[in-house]
Image (cartoon, grey):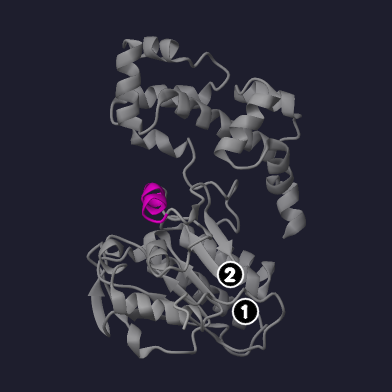
Amino acid sequence: MSTRPLRPKAARTTALPPKTRRVAMLAYPDVQMLDVMGPLEVFSRASRWLKDSGLRDDHAYQVEIIGLKRGAFPASSGLRLHADRRFDEVRRGIDTLLIAGGRGAERYCAHPPLLRWIRRQAGFVRRLASICTGTFFLAEAGLLEGRRATTHWASCDALARRHPGIQVEADRIFVQDGGLYTSAGVTAGMDLALALVEEDHGREAALETARALVMFLRRPGGQAQFSAQLSVQLAKQEPLRELQAYIQDHPRADLSVPTLARRVAMSPRNFARVFTREVGMTPARFVTSTRVETARRLLEESSEDLETVCAMSGLGTPEAMRRAFLHKVGIPPGQYRERFTRHAIAATS
């Protein structure tokens, strides 16, 4: 008999009967609270809006938390969650199974009975999804082998090292591969939940849910989860934080290592060493990331031609921009503009 793990069914695209869908979140001690409550709140709000708007007589979604045991358990914040049922009490009947991440993921993703249960559920549920480092449960269960996936930006390298058969897409908010969905860190789980609501009930339901929760339906440049702008938070020394801000404000300037080193009164060699230690990437890599991010915004928000975008972002020539985009984003700039301009997003919504 084959021991190959079952995989979840591909997400349906045809209309489903108007029944309540059960959405279950698997959680455990030291789970990240927002990984659990954020997505469940999205489904709950969508259900409320559909009923209040007269589009349904019943609730579109019924949400619940499944735990290692019934009852209360602590999240990583110290607050307590309550599991309605123990995981091994649950057999069939779940429509969408979500698996949260958090500090406890490292411990419990190697829990053999839990992994067996996840593999069984993969054959029953319509959709199986992970939030943040919940991706490691799917990986350890063998469900992501040969597939695309993402996780919290700080754990992408670890996921790729531990599971080289997974195609890790580190710059994505969430990734769908058939009936499997994986999201980036923490609040990205809410982006994924909105996409699932849109898949089930259309754009209007997802948009109204996003408005109620004061969220973007799609984040601008929504496939990026860890942009160069966010990395400014990583530097501890004030001169380096100021330098990072300067780089972001002046992408067209001379941003060579010798020039940047002079701005902070350091030797080029010492500057490169300290910058890499503080920021987690070399100065050259940070500069390139910043310029690509600038070009991405220009492609999304302006109608400037590619040569102008090259000049304004500091990337130089169209060929240099193309190489940088293929390396950082995975697609060339022209294709990026077709997919992610505001006009393109509106046209496909």
Dots 1, 2 in contact, CB < 8 A: no
Tell me where residue 142 appears, x and y as whole percent.
43, 68
Residue drawn where x is 25% and y is 62% of the image: 77
Q: Amino acid at mark 1?
A: Leu
Residue at (40%, 33%) from the top-left corner?
Answer: 232
Q: Nearer the viewer, residue 319 or 198?
A: 319
Residue at (35% x, 90% y) in the render: 89
Query: Image check: 208 left or right of 130?
Result: right
Residue 155 counted in the magenta span:
yes
Image location (x, y in percent) of residue 179: 57, 71
Q: Is residue 76 magenta?
A: no
Q: Quadrant of the C terminus?
A: bottom right
Instruction: Give the prevailing secondary structure in the magenta stretch.
Output: helix
Q: Which residues are magenta?
A: 154-163
Q: Quadrant of residue 37?
A: bottom left
- Let me know if residue 86 appears in the view: no
Is the residue marked by circle 2 packed among few (<14), some (14-19), or many (20+) residues within 10 Å? Answer: some
Q: Is residue 212 left or right of residue 318?
A: left
Q: What amino acid does circle 2 point to?
A: Leu
Helix or strand or loop: what does disc 2 sit on? helix
Q: Is residue 158 above or below residue 91?
A: above
Q: Nearer the viewer, residue 76 or 329?
A: 329
Q: Residue furthest front?
A: 1
Image disc number at residue 196: 2
* Residue at image mark 1: 50
